[in-house]
Image (spheres, grey):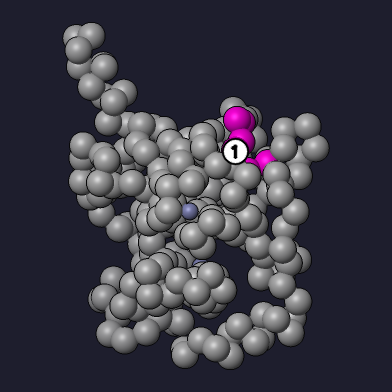
Amino acid sequence: MQMKIAIEEDVETIPLKCTCGKIQGIAKNITPKAGNHIVCMCVDCQAFAHYLGKSKESLDENGGTHIFQITPKQVEVTVGREHLKCMQMSPKGLKRWYADCCKMPIANTLSFKISFVGLFTTFIDFENTELSKDELLGPIICRGMGKYGKGKLPDDTHQKFPIILIFKMIKTILIGKVIKSYLPNTFFNKETGNAITKEIILSKKEREKLKDKMVL
Ligand SMILES: [Zn+2]
Ligand SMILES: [Zn+2]
């Protein structure tokens, strides 16, 4: 029995690593049920990949970004936190984290007490996990914002995001307020509630320029 518990703990904690290895971390309690494995094709996610100069590496053939939505307490950057940068497409936009060292996208967050982390699955070091991506994250449960998708979209693609997924996220955030699943929080300072690094906020002009560069 004890053996079984040990194995289960083992497979649930998985390594995270940026392309160059300066940023490393762990994701805890990773099972298909512990998060939402989704693809987002929205303009801002695509623009973020272009902002980093990583559209080829980060976007799939439909312009989709692959994300595993979890809570802050499940993610910890253990090495190289000083290389984390945070940008926003607009003052109220998602806080989008990336590796300044190699420009790998890391995660999307909202604010300190909102239990939401959209972990970019490319940040997961699948080469050093015992289980495959499918076994760890489960199948993609939702492809959303297909109205901005490119090429031939899979049949199950949604134009926006289905209400059921939005409810699921709201539920996690509401429960998160009670059980404080935003703690510990690797992206925000617990004392001040601020992001650990000053956000780079794009101006309207910069945002337009970036979107002009994208072929939608
Ligand atoms: Zn998006
Ligand atoms: Zn790096």
Horizontal arrangement in the rendering, residue 21 relative to residue 210 (left or right): left
What residue sits 38% from the left and 75% below the top? 56
Identify the residue shown where x is 74% and y is 81%.
Answer: 204
Tell me the chief SS of the magenta region. loop
Left-right relation of 49 to 194: left
Residue appearing at x 49%, y 60% in the figure: 102
What is the span of residues highlighted in magenta in the rendered image? Answer: 183-188
Placement of 214 over or under 123, stated as above or below: below
Residue 177 in which image quadrant: top right
Tag 1 secondary structure: loop
Residue 27 sits above or below residue 66 on the image: above
184 in magenta: yes
Res 55 visible: yes
Q: Residue furthest top?
A: 2
As shown in the figure, which amino acid type bears the numbered disc 1? Thr
Q: Nearer the viewer, residue 63 or 145?
A: 63
Is residue 162 covered in magenta?
no
Say which quadrant the N terminus sits in.
top left
